[in-house]
């Protein structure tokens, strides 16, 4: 019998070695945590997360001022982590997370190389990313043949495994991965018949609509959905119907599209099973933990960043958020809990959510609030208030549900506050 | 030459084969699909009914109550999770209360243990999430839950471990009886000879009977659509919650499954198409609406998947289990609608007694092993069991399905252990790979790789469920080094 099983202790454990985990780890070291006191746990055999299968460009424009591919972007952070000497365990899946009586967190994980691993950590950064909404959750009626994939699974087959999941494709949902895969499948010789989107607007970035659909003459049907999947063994076609303003299919609008593949790009769901298991409160709208400006959850010493916290459009913002979490963890390890007051941040009206959900005062740095709207809004002012006091007011020409927005509150603006709550709302012009 | 050929490897055929594997007999199962449990046994309510629905004196009543009583030992021997969670039938008004009384009387006549009627408040004390409008309920503690395809896989596997042969992809299209021997011919021209044939072809039992020379049976499919919810809904109820039954069946139920999910359904609709397992928007909406009537708090956004099952009904509305009236050395099993799953162990026992009466020699095997070695379930193990397993085989340390915590080791075992899986759905049914909330989004590429490697086939030949259900159509342009 091989010698297996391991017991370890660390100051900081980072669950997930994608862009969020890597940036958090590097930031923690840069803010004073010794590299050998950190451990990154990654379920895949390589660091980099989902970026490794995103071989298209467009990553890093904000961060590095240049267009990188996903693997290139990931490599910059992986290199930094390696140079800093931060250890990681690969092909390692975390199974449980809970808080011990002494306040430390116990993590169990498993890998072929080490067997069962039991880890005790003072601080944890959650960076598990997100998953795609699948067919089951979408409840699409019809048969259950082969040829139905989430866009991300198809992306893995094509870009990593080198296989084509199909030749004649219909895509449901216009999330960014779906748009990217419309282009990718086309470049690989497949015919993308149509992209159907339930909502009256796209869920993806405007630049992806242009570069991935329009540039390839792929039609986008807004306010349309698949109402039936056909085919016994392999998909043979789909019925697509127009939907009314309540998203119900309109009888008589059915169109049949022959295809052998259906790709689903209908939203991403933060993977918070561990978070929930640990008893950490979640925001029902984001699906991620409730956090403060340093991305600390309601469980002291546990931080969260990246798509596990809320779904981002751009990895550049994931990295920035993870750096807040990594620095926050470093500071918490050195100084313990924040002594000041904590104000709630509440979205109002068409603003669906705001991250962070709380802000601790007094603030010694500027605080940037990220939010999304629930519908397309043209020419509106974003207003952040605390009671009667307006903390921020700024115009936006257009706000889209598919594009995350943010406002920055200056530290000095926040300095006078010590009670109440912050509200974020839009005022139409 | 086989002593007995069983046509159909659903839960009834598999349990008949297993029962026969106790004896010194050459037995085979002939299954037209790529795997066992591919018909009615794959998609149904997964309930071991207590037996209060059946008309007293019917074959159904006898088989159900007997089958129910046999389940504890059977499940234990086959290492199949089985739980007596109890059944509860809700009454919402006076008419329902009358129906409950009828069910109670039937239950008592049928010998259902412990069956009783309780008040609405007593029902809610037992099940706090059932509707406030419930005025009375029938409770039957012997009702249970089991995974129907898992039971079938385990029964077929145990039969095979004890010498039974399984031929998948063997669709019987022709049969002759000559010189005391049946010759069964498959669609692709293969032949099996057997002294005795047992027709356990479920939804197709009438067609198979006709091929065998019995033209007086008719089976029609009753469609039932279901919604399966995530585990976070699995504790909404502990009993299996029924509404009052009608001529069309036992009504929409809300039940936990042995795997911890919540199952809602089925609708009930007679159709002639025996292969139409498509779900419909109307059907799923009906399930959602009626399930909410029983348990108003159920979160319908937590749906993981939906499916349609086809039950095989007969106009007689009773099981037919009998030696053929027209042909020698043939037993017909047909009309196995609900409670077929609950009755299957008793049906198997009864079929063997019929075979004995027909002159089949039943000499017990010295080395029959009723116990099946299950595929290890990593997710259900404690730390020490996991340590030990990984130490024996490192592949049990590699998690492939994150949602259901399934390891590479389990997938490998599913591809080699009796009855071996041949495809992705077969692996899924044996291990729960891809059955979680991500619907296989993360694990499918890795599972396909393992299946290809273990079966020694290229990835492009891996199928979802046999036949033409290939998952991949070829190599990507850049990856095609042979082009």
Image (tube, rainbow, N blue to C red):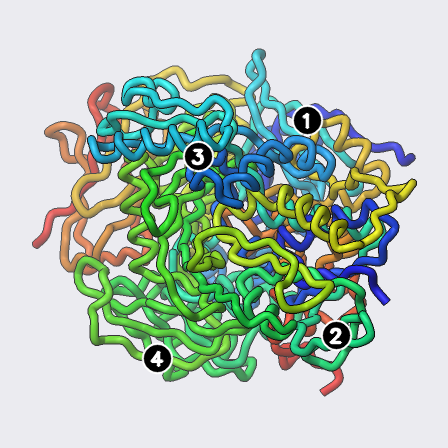
Are the residues at dot 3 and dot 1 in contact (C-beta closer than 8 Å)?
A: no
According to the picture, the residue beneath numbered tag 1 turns out to be A119
In three-dimensional space, the C-alpha distance between marks 2 and 3, rounded to whole angstroms, equals 41 Å
Instruction: Please state if B372 lies on the left or on the right of A416 as rendered.
Output: right
Residue under mark 1: which chain is it in? A
Q: Nearer the viewer, mark 3 or mark 1?
A: 3
The front one of B30 and A197 is B30
Position in image of residue A416 (x %, y %): 22, 23
Position in image of residue B351 (x %, y %): 68, 50
According to the picture, the residue beneath numbered tag 2 turns out to be B177
According to the picture, the residue beneath numbered tag 4 turns out to be A256
Q: Quadrant of the C terminus of chain B?
A: bottom right
Instruction: Name the mark on residue B52.
Output: 3
Position in image of residue A103 (x %, y %): 55, 15
Residue under mark 3: which chain is it in? B
Instruction: Please state if B360 lies on the left or on the right of B301 as rendered.
Output: right
In three-dimensional space, the C-alpha distance between marks 4 and 3, rounded to whole angstroms, equals 47 Å
Are the residues at dot 4 and dot 3 in contact (C-beta closer than 8 Å)?
A: no
Q: Nearer the viewer, mark 2 or mark 4?
A: 2
| Residue located at (72% from left, 48% from top) | B352
| Residue located at (69% from left, 32% from top) | B73
């Amino acid at each position: 019998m091989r010698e297996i099983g391991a017991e370890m202790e660390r100051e900081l454990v980072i669950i997930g070695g994608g862009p969020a985990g890597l940036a958090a780890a590097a930031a923690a070291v840069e803010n004073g945590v010794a590299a050998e006191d950190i451990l990154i746990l990654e379920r895949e055999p390589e660091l980099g997360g989902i970026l490794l299968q995103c071989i298209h460009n467009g990553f890093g424009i904000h961060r590095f001022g240049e267009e990188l591919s996903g693997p290139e972007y990931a490599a910059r952070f992986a290199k930094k982590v390696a140079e800093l000497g931060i250890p990681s365990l690969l092909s390692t899946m975390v199974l449980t997370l809970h808080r011990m009586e002494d306040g430390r967190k116990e993590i169990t994980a498993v890998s072929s190389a080490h067997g069962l691993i039991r880890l005790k950590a003072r601080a944890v950064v959650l960076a598990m990313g997100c998953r795609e909404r699948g067919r089951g959750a979408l409840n699409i009626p019809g048969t259950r043949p082969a040829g139905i994939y989430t866009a991300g699974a198809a992306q893995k087959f094509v870009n990593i495994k080198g296989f084509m999941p199909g030749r004649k494709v219909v895509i449901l949902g216009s999330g960014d991965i779906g748009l990217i895969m419309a282009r990718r499948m086309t470049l690989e010789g497949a015919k993308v018949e149509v992209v159907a989107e339930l909502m009256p607007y796209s869920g993806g970035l405007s630049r992806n609509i242009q570069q991935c659909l329009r540039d390839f003459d792929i039609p986008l049907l807004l306010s349309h959905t698949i109402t039936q999947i056909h085919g016994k063994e392999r998909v043979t076609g789909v019925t697509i119907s127009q939907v009314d303003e309540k998203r119900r299919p309109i009888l008589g609008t059915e169109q049949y599209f022959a295809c052998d593949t259906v790709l689903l790009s209908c939203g991403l769901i933060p993977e918070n099973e561990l978070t929930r298991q640990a008893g950490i409160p979640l925001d029902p709208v984001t699906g991620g933990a409730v956090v403060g400006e340093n991305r600390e959850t309601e469980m002291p010493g546990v931080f969260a960043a990246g798509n596990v916290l809320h779904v981002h459009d751009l990895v550049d913002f994931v990295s920035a958020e993870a750096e807040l979490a990594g620095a926050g963890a470093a500071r918490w390890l050195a100084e313990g809990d924040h002594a000041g007051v904590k104000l709630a941040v509440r979205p109002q009206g068409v603003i669906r959510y705001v991250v962070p959900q709380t802000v601790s005062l007094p603030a010694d740095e500027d605080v940037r609030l990220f939010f999304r709207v629930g519908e397309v809004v043209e020419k509106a002012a974003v207003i952040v208030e605390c009671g009667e006091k307006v903390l921020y007011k700024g115009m936006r020409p257009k706000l889209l549900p598919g594009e995350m927005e943010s406002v920055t509150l200056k530290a000095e603006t926040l300095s006078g506050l010590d009670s109440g709550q912050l509200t974020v709302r839009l005022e139409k012009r | 030459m086989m002593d007995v050929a069983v046509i159909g490897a659903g839960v009834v055929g598999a349990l008949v084969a297993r029962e026969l594997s106790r004896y010194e007999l050459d037995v085979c199962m002939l299954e037209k699909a790529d795997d066992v449990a591919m018909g009615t046994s794959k998609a149904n309510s997964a309930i071991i009914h207590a037996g209060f629905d059946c008309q007293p004196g019917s074959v159904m009543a006898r088989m159900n109550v007997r089958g129910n009583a046999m389940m504890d030992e059977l499940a234990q021997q086959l290492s199949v999770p089985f739980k007596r969670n109890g059944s509860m039938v809700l009454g919402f008004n006076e008419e329902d209360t009358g129906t409950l009384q009828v069910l109670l009387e039937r239950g008592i006549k049928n010998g259902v243990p412990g069956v009783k009627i309780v008040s609405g408040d007593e029902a809610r004390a037992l099940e706090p999430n059932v509707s406030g409008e419930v005025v009375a309920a029938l409770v039957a503690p012997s009702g249970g839950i089991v995974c129907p395809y898992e039971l079938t896989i385990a029964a077929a596997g145990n039969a095979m471990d004890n010498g039974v042969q399984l031929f998948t992809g063997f669709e019987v299209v022709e049969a002759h009886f000559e010189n005391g021997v049946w010759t069964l011919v498959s669609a692709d021209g293969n032949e099996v000879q057997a002294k005795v044939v047992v027709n356990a072809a479920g939804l197709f039992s009438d067609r198979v009977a006709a091929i065998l020379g019995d033209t007086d049976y008719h089976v029609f499919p009753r469609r039932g659509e279901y919604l399966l919810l995530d585990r976070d809904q699995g504790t909404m109820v502990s009993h299996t919650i029924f509404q009052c039954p009608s001529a069309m069946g036992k009504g929409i139920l809300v039940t936990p499954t042995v795997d911890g999910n919540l199952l809602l359904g089925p609708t009930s609709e007679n159709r002639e198409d025996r292969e139409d397992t498509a779900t419909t928007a109307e059907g799923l909406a009906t399930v959602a609406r009626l399930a909410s009537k029983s348990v108003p708090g159920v979160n319908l956004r937590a749906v993981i998947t939906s499916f349609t099952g086809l039950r095989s009904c007969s106009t007689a509305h009773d099981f037919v289990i009998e030696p053929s009236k027209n042909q020698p050395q043939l037993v017909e099993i047909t009309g196995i609608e609900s409670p077929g799953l609950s009755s299957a162990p008793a049906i198997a026992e009864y079929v063997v007694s019929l075979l004995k009466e027909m002159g089949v020699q039943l000499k017990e095997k010295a080395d029959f092993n009723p116990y099946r070695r299950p595929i290890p379930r990593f997710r259900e193990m404690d730390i020490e069991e996991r340590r030990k397993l990984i130490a024996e085989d490192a592949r049990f340390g590699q998690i492939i399905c994150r949602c259901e915590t399934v390891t590479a080791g389990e997938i490998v075992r599913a591809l080699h252990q009796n009855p071996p899986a041949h495809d992705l759905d077969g692996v899924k049914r044996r291990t729960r790979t891809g059955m979680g909330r991500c619907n296989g989004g993360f694990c499918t590429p890795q599972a396909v790789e393992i299946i290809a490697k273990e079966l020694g086939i290229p990835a492009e030949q891996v199928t979802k469920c046999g036949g033409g259900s290939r998952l991949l159509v070829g190599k990507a342009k850049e990856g095609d080094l042979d082009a």
